[in-house]
Image: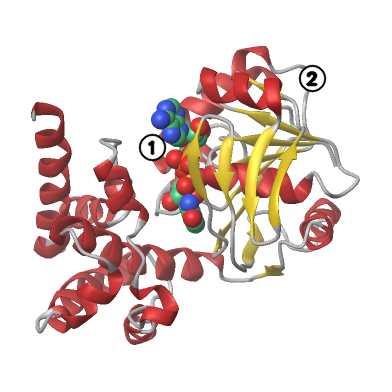
Amino acid sequence: VKIAIAGAGAMGGRFGTMLAQTDNPVTFIDLWADHVQAINQHGLLVHTDNGDQRVHVPAYLPQNVPGTFDLIVLFTKAMGIADMLTALKPVITPQTHILELGNGIGNIETISRFVPKEQIIAGVTVWSAALNGPGEITMKGDGSVTLEALGSNEAPFFKQVVQVLTDAGLKPTASHDVLAAIWRKAALNSVLNTYCTILDCNIGEFGQLPDHDAMIDGVLGEFAAIAANQHVHFDAAGAKQLIIAQFPDDKNGLHYPSMHQDMAKGRKTEIDFLNGYIAKVGARENIPTPVNATLTALIHGQEKLKTLH
Ligand code: NAD
């Protein structure tokens, strides 16, 4: 399977590194020229649990990509998907499948503007990684992938993708209700990422706040109402349990969520694809979503003030 990683940041770098250990050819594609240049000059420097390595995988800006691919693994931020797919239009063929495992709701709708749903494989992952600077990532800890072919999980190419991910050690599981998994992860992020960013705290500190329970319920109650409207299975009690399970220090208590890190670096957050998605659909469908709308406005406010200070 000829693989491209489109968006070779933290997660793209991790998946590319692991996939490059199989027999399948891997290419990195990224819009950040300094990052592309660093990878081509020195290889991608990767810090792992077992020490450092340099991964030599060719990297290109989208407009310079040679040839076509069987599988494009998309790992831009949610708001970067459309720009990346627009840039890659010339190399996307009727045989190209897009694998999308990023955070947020609405990514499938965005990708559907570029390819038919039979060419989309969607899911979520609990692998993690960090981008330290051009040409350098840290990938530690364990993870897994849950994914579903939007055409059919019986399609031979989907089975091949699952085998390739297995060979790379990425621990994939095929699902028949990947939307439920995507919404559960989005709900977790819409609570922990958003509150920890607004409150400038880590996950454990959020869990110690006396009012954390009401804050979680406010977000999840509106998620449940919008999920019902969209015919998505959403288990608010299960999502809440998953959130609370992150509080101890030996789970994710000491961790500052990625939105907190993006805000600190002055980068745009994925808020419009988390709480913002719930607020947007609520407004469109006349379903009250004041908690998620207010949280979205607060994060946008912080983003805006960052650029003014
Ligand atoms: P990332 O910010 O590391 O990379 C995303 C894109 O942004 C890449 O194309 C990268 O080159 C570009 N980029 C990053 N810094 C830049 C800079 N200073 N200048 C120019 N371009 C820059 O994002 P990520 O963490 O790999 O996340 C990709 C998706 O995966 C997101 O939807 C995220 O929510 C999700 N996700 C991330 C993690 C994680 O641990 N990082 C875990 C699960 C899911």
Question: Which quadrant holds residue 69?
Answer: top right
Q: Is 56 on the left or on the right of 261, as rendered?
A: right
Count residues near mark 2 (Cα–Cα under 10 Å), then give few for <14, some for 14-19, many for 20+: few
The residue under the point 80% across, 44% down is 20
Which residue has dot 1 on it? 79
- How crowded is the residue under tag 1: few (<14 C-alpha within 10 Å), some, or many (20+)? some
Residue 46 visible at all: yes
User: Is any part of residue 81 visible from this angle?
Assistant: no
Task: Indicate which disc, 2 or 1, sits on the residue closer to the N terminus.
Answer: 2
**Label 1 secondary element:** helix
Question: Could you tell me residue 183's position as x and y percent?
Answer: 41, 66
For the point 47% across and 70% down, the residue is: 180
Residue on which the image places disc 2: 67
Query: Percent x, y for residue 111?
Result: 52, 39
User: 141 above or below 11?
Assistant: below
Q: Residue at x 14, y 61 (%)?
A: 199
Q: Are marks 2 and 1 in contact (CB under 8 Å)?
A: no
Question: Considering only vertical position in the picture, is 15 above or below 60?
Answer: below
Front one among 152 and 277: 277
